Amino acid sequence: MAYDEGLAETLRGDLEGRDVREQKMFGGLCFMLEGHMLCGAMSGHAMFRVGAANMPAATALDGVDQVEMGGRRMTGFVWAAEDAAADDDTRAALLKMATGFVATLPPK
């Protein structure tokens, strides 16, 4: 599955100045911070690792839902549908949650 290069470029802009590396995974392009997945560009949507405590706030945003892969719901990960991922405010809110959560994890 190919990822949305336009969305990847938008996320690169959002992450400018941060020490992130890119890695292909989950059928898309993920951005890694301190060795942990922070967010990613997929085909038609973005994925953010917001952590379990941020799930209610994240999924309350329009166009955001918990990630489900292979029939299993992934705690702490959310999808932002194409319209939500394109919305600067929604994307910024999710990125803030994701950055805050990943900062609590020990570096790999």
Image (cartoon, rainbow, N blue to C red):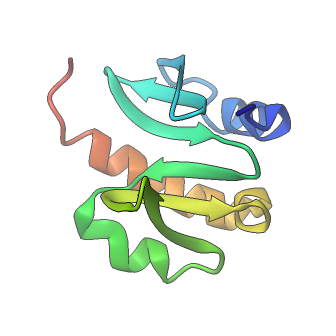
User: In the current view of this chain or complex, which residue is farthest to the left?
Assistant: 106
Above or below residue 97? Residue 108 is above
Q: Position of residue 78 (x, y in %)?
A: 47, 60
Q: Residue at x 51, y 72 (%)?
A: 65
Above or below residue 20? Residue 14 is below
Above or below residue 104? Residue 23 is above
Asked where in the image residue 5 lies, by quadrant, the reply is top right
Location of the N terminus (image quadrant):
top right
Q: Residue at x 32, y 20 (%)?
A: 35
Which of the two residues, 25 or 86, is positioned nearer the viewer here? 25
Q: Residue at x 49, y 83 (%)?
A: 60
User: In the current view of this chain or complex, which residue is farthest to the right?
Assistant: 6
Q: Is residue 49 left or right of residue 106?
A: right
Q: Position of residue 36 (x, y in %)?
A: 33, 29
Which of the two residues, 95 or 78, is positioned nearer the viewer here? 78
Q: Is residue 45 left or right of residue 68?
A: right
Tally the numbered discs.
0
Q: Is residue 47 left or right of residue 38?
A: right
Location of the C terminus (image quadrant):
top left
Q: Is residue 36 left or right of residue 2?
A: left
Q: Position of residue 26 (x, y in %)?
A: 51, 35
